[in-house]
Each structure stands twice: as structure tokens, then as C-alpha cells.
Image (cartoon, rainbow, N blue to C red):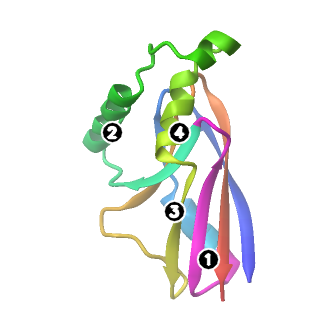
Amino acid sequence: MVYGKEIHLNTKGFSDIHDVTARIGDIIGASGIRDGLVSVTSIGSTASVTTIEFEPALVEDFRELLEKLARVDQPTRHGSTWGDDNGFSHLRASLMGPGVTLPIADGRLILGTWQQVVVVDHDNRPRDRRIRVQVVGE
């Protein structure tokens, strides 16, 4: 069986990070699927989905790391071509990837004790983000 639903988020950009773990759990519950996989994917080329311990100090550490990898003020050919100055957001999203696939057992998302699923909006402006959650199993 396959069950899918979207999560919508209003984000601020500049690697704004949102915990979506509970919302994914609700979608898994609504699916009726007891054992299988859940795929969580950002729709768009300037956001990512990953797992992290979602606590304020680590969230800031993560943002600092992203800034070192692809600085906001880093000139890019993309920014020069399109004039939107968000080349860094495409680079960050490409490095992290658009999504994750995680196991489901007994109707529950399997995560470590301190592990949450987060959406990272890398763009340089607020966005209405669409996140596709696809549950597959039985």
C-alpha cells in the first residue's frame, strides 16, 4: 500500500530549520501502514530534509557549518546569470539532498532517542515550502 500527503511550512529562508517529526508521525498514523518506509522530500531546489538532534545550540552549529560550506555572500555564476543572489541556497540544498527515507515498525517512525526529522530552507527569502511524505508498506 502507498499513502501520501504534503506538509506545508512558512519559512524565513537563510537555513531556517523546522522540526517536522510529529507531523510525519501523524501522517504515518493516518496511513494505517504498520511496517514499511516513509520518504520525506522537499519539493524545490533550495530546501533539504535531514535528521538532527533539534536543539538550539546544535541548530546554530549546523547553520554555521552551512555558512562555511556555501557562504551567503559567495558570488556564484547562478546569481550573476539570474540576478537572484541565491546561488548559495542551491549549493547547500545540493550538498544535503532533498530528502530522507526512514523505517516504520509497528506503525511508528523509527528514530534514535535524540533524532528528529527537519526541513532546512536555504533560500534567501521567506517561502511556502511543500514537503511530500510518502508512506509505503503494509
Magenta range is 30-46
Q: CA distance from mark 1 to mark 2?
A: 30 Å
Residue that numbered label 1 is attached to = 29
Spot occupied by residue 45 in the image (x, y as percentages of width and height): 64, 38
| Callouts 3 and 4 close, C-beta under 8 Å | no
Helix, strand or loop at disc 4?
Answer: helix
Residue that numbered label 2 is attached to = 62
Residue that numbered label 4 is attached to = 93
Residue at 59% across, 87% down:
34
Decide which of tag 1 and tag 3 comes sooner along the chain. 3
In this rendered view, identify the residue nearer to me: 59 or 50.
50
In the depicted structure, whether residue 46 falls above or below residue 6:
above
Decide which of tag 1 and tag 2 comes sooner along the chain. 1
Q: CA distance from mark 1 to mark 3?
A: 10 Å
The three-letter amino acid code for the residue at tag 3 is Ala
- Closer mark to the observer between disc 1 and disc 2: 2
Helix, strand or loop at disc 3?
Answer: helix
